[in-house]
Amino acid sequence: MYYQKSGDARAVEEQLYAALNAGGANVNTARAEQERRAMAAAAAANRVSMAQGFDFGAGAVNGGWPVDPALVRSQLEYYFSDENLSTDSYLRSFIMPQEGWVSLLLFQEFPRIRSLGADIWALRQVSAESVQLEMDATGMYVRILDLERRRKWATTSDESTAWQ
């Protein structure tokens, strides 16, 4: 059976049903054509939305790229800055006693990180490239690289309130 090229999704569906009723010999071809047209329509809609500047989600930042690593790294480093930690008792409560590690999963839930479209993979990538932060071997925790600054903010076990 020959499948005509048509922009009409209804025609493709009719061709799919006709192939199913005819014994299914060309079902895969009809499904592939239907998927191809759906992807082409989605790509066209995406091009239009980017050209018009619409934002259809947190991932549509940085000119259509999902995540801007420089912005995410800057934000993550800001969270560990003396300026922020001096007033952010919430974040300080999650700094592990003596070692100074903080879970990247915590940062993933911060509204600013979410608005940048960063997931755990993006946070790992920018942590690994940061000159101010270090990541542990599991890739799940990050801390201040400078030992003196880290000691300033890492609490002792009696001062920590995160686990109480």
Image (cartoon, grey):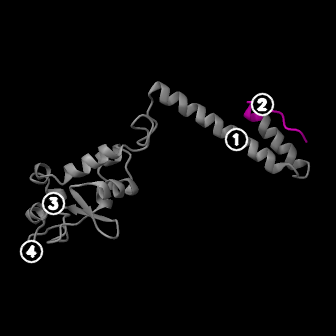
- Compare marks 4 and 1 and give the one earlier in the sequence: 1
At numbered mark 3, what does the secondary structure look like: helix, strand or loop? helix
Neighbour class for label 3 at 10 Å: few (<14), some, many (≥20)? many
Tell me: residue 123, above or below residue 7. below
Mark 2: amino acid: Ser
Q: Mark 3 and mark 2: span between their CA atoms?
A: 60 Å
Q: Nearer the observer, disc 1 or disc 3?
A: 1
**Residue designated by label 2:** 6
Q: Which of 162 and 134 is in front in this view?
A: 134
- Compare marks 1 and 2 and give the one earlier in the sequence: 2
Q: Nearer the observer, disc 4 or disc 1?
A: 1
At numbered mark 4, what does the secondary structure look like: helix, strand or loop? loop
**Residue designated by label 4:** 158
**Residue designated by label 3:** 92
Tell me: residue 144, above or below residue 72. below
- Compare marks 4 and 2 and give the one earlier in the sequence: 2
In the image, the segment drawn in magenta is 1-10
At numbered mark 1, what does the secondary structure look like: helix, strand or loop? helix
Mark 1: amino acid: Arg
Q: Mark 4 and mark 3: span between their CA atoms?
A: 14 Å
Q: Tell me, yes or no, whether the highlighted magenta stretch contains residue 6.
A: yes
Mark 3: amino acid: Arg
**Residue designated by label 1:** 36
